[in-house]
Amino acid sequence: MTKNNPPKVKLYIIFSCLLILLVTSFLVEKKPIEPKGIFYNADGKAVMPPFPPSFEHPLGTDENGTDLLIKLVSGYKYTFIFSIGIAFLRMVLAIVCSFLILFFLKPLKPFIESILTPFYYVPAFIMFLFLANKEQGELIVAAHGEKFLIIYQMLVIVLIGIPPLISLMMGEFELLLYKDYVTASRLLGANYFHLVKKQLFPVFKSRLFIIFIQQTISTVILLIYLGIFQIYIGGQAKGGVFGEDDKFLSKSNEWGGMIGQSIFDMVHYPWILLFPSIALICLILMFNTIIKQLEKL
Amino acid sequence: MRKRQFLHISINISSVLIKIILLLLSISCITSLSSLFFASSFGFYPNTYLKVVLKTFIGLFTIWNSTFFYIGKEYNVFPVILDKYFYTMSILFFSLVTTILLSFLFSYLYFFFSKKIKDLLFGLLGVLDSIPDIIIILASQLLFISLYKKTGIKFLQLYGIGGEKVYFLPTLCLSFVPFVMVLKIMIKIFEEQREQQYVEFAIAKGLNRSTVFLKHVVPNVIKSLYSHISLIYWYMLSSLFMIEYLFQLDGLTPLLYLVRDSSLNSVVVIMFLIPFGLLKLTSFTILKGGSRIDKE
């Protein structure tokens, strides 16, 4: 069956890749690696991290001497789970809201759309900066602790993504709602719930999955944007970098944060920027391939 | 009859007015969001929020006479904001033009390749499409800095420190992301157009491919590209924020996140929406005009 269906085979390969990476990412966490500080090489000269890529460290090390490959692999699970979780929450809330508007607030729809327009054109990270910039984050940590901050940041990211998603979904659902078979079913007395469950979702399933992956990609990109503004999801930790003790770094090694924190060092130690970027591009490429194969199915 | 027409127009105008007021209100709601959760400490303050939204909304009409603080200095709103706006918009405009010209050129070349190379190129486009704009910006900065370090020659002014107006590299970076997208859209439209009968007929008649491309396909493509223009504008807008931050340009966008004045922030958002509204209006009339010609 699957042999005649190359898109499906490709999808299985990509999904298993993502899963294997996730499992390795959880396994790596269990054995912490001692970072290397200053040490002396064979000539008796003091050598300081970060080290360039070498046989011992295939992707080089960061300023603390931690291996970049291990950092990347262990950070993957945060990036992956965080973006998937946010995309899922966004989808559920947006679907519910758009159905509520379509079924119960139909006459107000044009006005609701004009309220939603600016949400479309103010980039998501600017909205995030309105709601949870650095000083506000410190206020929250002072009041409720760090775990609360992570939940709050997550909620904010979910909420700012919903308005554009609602207007997208409303457009798509409306097209379906005026199909003849849906009208027929409604005339026969189907209630809204039945309509959604039996008439709309079976048609809409694969399209929903594509939108879900697109939302995941946009979340990953949003995480880089926030990283550039020195907002790290999963909390920040004092860098402990030699000479620069007050520099904050991402605690979770989430990929967007890794790219964001590298912009200060990229001129002198380009590999700190280069490898996380390549990893991130690969991840997005995988998601894009999933979308492409799903469209072929 | 005439009375009814008049009534119709007045209803139309009033609904447009209501929409504009709702738009302004919703912009003020966004820009004053921070006061919903933060006063002197973290909490939930709906009453203060409503007050701040109202204040922001009223402030929109008196903003021209006020001043704002930006990196430790006080500025008058009126001449400064227009200056910054002009700079930002010129970068946006240049890169829009670059994008469209480049993608026309590339899709013109694409038109002549064989099937195999076309597939290869399309795959390459898919890879390029997955590169986030930030990585492009950082990589280009890295490239030029390392070129400078290697050769000692300063090719370009990279950063806009000290109020210097930099154009070249920001424009180039800003055009890259939409370039890939526009090229993809264009290739799709071109392929659709190629299968149309009028193109086959023209080629069968013995016209050469360039003439067919330039005289027959391009005008049709421009029309359908225009329907995508708001999407392109949106893509460029969000990377524009990043570009002005990373190149430290003296543009309009830092006013959104460096100045804590919700009225001013709303004005900035409105200023970004103005070109979008104009684009949408013109595309609406163009598409409408096109359909009328089709009907005739």
Image (cartoon, coloured by chain):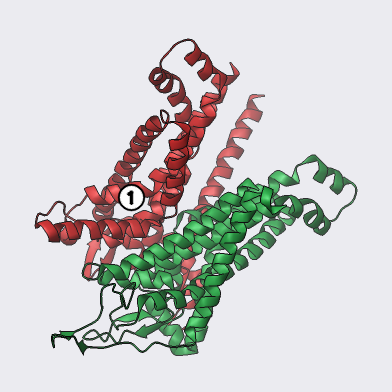
Chain colours: A green, B red
Examine the rendered structure and indicate whether residue A125 appears above or below residue B43.
above
Residue at the limit of the structure toward the top, as seen here: B205
Residue B278 is at least partly visible in this image = no
In-image side of B230 versus B164 (left or right): right
Nearer-the-camera pick, A294 or B11 = A294
Of B74 and A66, which appears nearest the observer?
A66
Horizontally, residue A50 falls left or right of residue A70, namely left
Q: Residue furthest left?
A: B152
Instruction: Tell me the residue at 55%/67% (across/down).
Output: A18
Quarter of the image where one finds residue B263: bottom left
Q: Who is closer to the viewer here, A101 or A19?
A: A19
In the displayed structure, B59 sits above or below A230; it is above
Q: Quadrant of the N terminus of chain B?
A: top right
Say what secondary structure mark 1 lies in.
Answer: helix
Q: Position of residue B189 (x, y in %)?
A: 50, 33
Q: Which residue is mark 1?
A: B174
How many numbered tags mark residues here?
1
